[in-house]
Structure formats: structure tokens, C-alpha cells
Image (cartoon, helix red, strand yellow):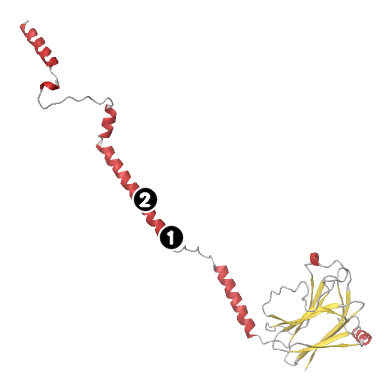
């Protein structure tokens, strides 16, 4: 019994003790959120957060340096980009050099004759000397230069109506000595005049040959309408060198009328 009383007395004394009973020790209220305190004192998480923060700072610095490098360095061109532009510039330079080497062309010698009936009668007996140039068409006669001659000559006439005529010279090397004829249609019907026979001003190149794709092509006589139904139209031109003459008979301005053409082309020494 005495042991139990001693134990009860000891427990009573311990319960009555407080932190203030010991010198140098102060009481402090405990945190009501122990989990927060544990999280704040978790050393492993603190290290992880510090590491993440360091990585973010490093990435930010690298991004800034990369941006500054892009501003200083010129943009890199993709493979093949600009090749077309360089090729176009090279072609233009080559064409300019080629044209610079071409000698200037002398103007042709032209004349007219009143012997219209005589020429038509003579050409009717020759093969391929009388042709029909249909409305909207352009007939081009290709005449290559030959070593045996020094000039090309031409004569032509028409029935009833005039026709456009002009001459060009192609400086490309001659590959064939045959005289050939090509017929082409005008693709500019929408720009035709409303009249049946729209006027073509002197010096105006006919529609369909305004844009010459051949850089070796030079103009000898611009296409314009000639009164070939009134008098014979003739002329000649001295060879400027090796190449091919393009004699154009243009009926592209006519909306309805076909033209009967009498013509001949020959060489002269």
C-alpha cells in the first residue's frame, strides 16, 4: 500500500511541473500543422527543389544566349534555295553577252512594183508559191543563209486585201539548208479589234510574236501591214553572218478574211 501511495504522490508531482519550473527553458506553443513543418524540414525535397531551380536558371541562360546568337548569325539558306535565282541571273548574263557579240543589223532594201498581174501569173505556175493565210494565222518562212550567196530577196502580193509582213534574223548556227514554212495561230483573240480589218500601226510587231523566247533573235524589219493587193512588195537584205531569216506573213489581225498570198524567196550573190 505504501508503494502505491509513493507512486501516486510521484505522478502528482510530475504532473504539476511545467517548463517554467526549470531555469533557462521557455515554453512554446506547438504548431497546429505538423505536416507542413515536416515538409519544410524534408531535406531530400529541399535538395530536389534547389536542383530544379538551378536547371531552370541554366535553361533560361542558354535560351538567352541562343537568341543572341541567332540575331548575330545570318539565317542559313536551305539546300537548293536560290539556285533558280542564280540560274536565272546566269542565263540573263549569258544572253546579254551573246547579244553584245552580235553585230548591228543593217536595214533592208525595199521596193514596190506595179507589175502585180505579171507576178501572180508567173507564181501560179510554180509549186508552193500560192498559199492561203487563214484568218488569225501567221505564216513564217524560215530561210537559212548559204555560203554561195550574199543576200536574201523576196517578192509577194495578195488578192483583194493587204497583209502584215516583217523579218527577223536568228543568229543560231544553221543546222539545215532547207527553206521551211510554219503556220501558227494567234492566241490573242480577246484583244482583236471589233472591225473586220483592224489597223496595225507601222513598227508594231504582230500579235503572237511580241514576246520572243529566242534570245538570238534580232529584228530586221518590224511587222506592219503592206498594200500587197495594190502593188508588188519586194526587198533584199545582206547576210549579217550565219543564221536563219524568219519572214513573217501576218494575218492575225483579220477576224473573218483569209488572204491569198503569192510569194517567192530567193538568194542573190
Q: Which residue is mark 2?
A: 60
| In this rendering, position of residue 60 left or right of residue 228 | left
Q: How far across and down, in percent of the image, does residue 4 sit?
A: 9, 8
Tell which residue pokes out farthest to the bottom in this image.
269
Q: Nearer the viewer, residue 151 or 181?
A: 151
Secondary structure type for disc 1: helix
| Residue in the image at 40% along x and 58% along y | 68
Secondary structure type for disc 2: helix
Note whether residue 247 is visible: no
Which image quadrant for residue 24?
Answer: top left
| Residue in the image at 33% along x and 48% along y | 57
Q: Which residue is mark 1?
A: 71
Rendered view: 47 above or below 145: above
Which image quadrant for residue 153?
Answer: bottom right
Q: How far across and down, in percent of the image, does residue 94 sit?
A: 60, 78
Q: How far across and down, in percent of the image, does residue 255 sit?
A: 86, 68
Which image quadrant for residue 40?
Answer: top left
Q: Nearer the viewer, residue 117 or 226?
A: 226
Amino acid at each position: 500500500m505504501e508503494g502505491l501511495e509513493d507512486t501516486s504522490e510521484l505522478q502528482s508531482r510530475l504532473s504539476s511541473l511545467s517548463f517554467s519550473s526549470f531555469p533557462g527553458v521557455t515554453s512554446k506553443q506547438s504548431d497546429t500543422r505538423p505536416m507542413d513543418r515536416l515538409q519544410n524540414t524534408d531535406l531530400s525535397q529541399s535538395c530536389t527543389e534547389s536542383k530544379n531551380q538551378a536547371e531552370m536558371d541554366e535553361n533560361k541562360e542558354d535560351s538567352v544566349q541562343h537568341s543572341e546568337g541567332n540575331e548575330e548569325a545570318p539565317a542559313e539558306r536551305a539546300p537548293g534555295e536560290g539556285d533558280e535565282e542564280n540560274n536565272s541571273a546566269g542565263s540573263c548574263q549569258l544572253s546579254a553577252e551573246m547579244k553584245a557579240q552580235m553585230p548591228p543589223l543593217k536595214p533592208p532594201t525595199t521596193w514596190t512594183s506595179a507589175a502585180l498581174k505579171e507576178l501572180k501569173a508567173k507564181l501560179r505556175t510554180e509549186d508552193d508559191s500560192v498559199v492561203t493565210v487563214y484568218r488569225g494565222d501567221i505564216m513564217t518562212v524560215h530561210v537559212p543563209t548559204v555560203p554561195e550567196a550574199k543576200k536574201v530577196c523576196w517578192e509577194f502580193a495578195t488578192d483583194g486585201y493587204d497583209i502584215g509582213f516583217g523579218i527577223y534574223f536568228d543568229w543560231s548556227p544553221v543546222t539545215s539548208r532547207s527553206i521551211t514554212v510554219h503556220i501558227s495561230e494567234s492566241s490573242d483573240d480577246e484583244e482583236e479589234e471589233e472591225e473586220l480589218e483592224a489597223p496595225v500601226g507601222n513598227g508594231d510587231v504582230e500579235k503572237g510574236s511580241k514576246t520572243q523566247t529566242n534570245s538570238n533573235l534580232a529584228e530586221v524589219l518590224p511587222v506592219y501591214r503592206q498594200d500587197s493587193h495594190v502593188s508588188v512588195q519586194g526587198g533584199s537584205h545582206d547576210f549579217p553572218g550565219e543564221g536563219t531569216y524568219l519572214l513573217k506573213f501576218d494575218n492575225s489581225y483579220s477576224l473573218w478574211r483569209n488572204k491569198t498570198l503569192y510569194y517567192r524567196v530567193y538568194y542573190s550573190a
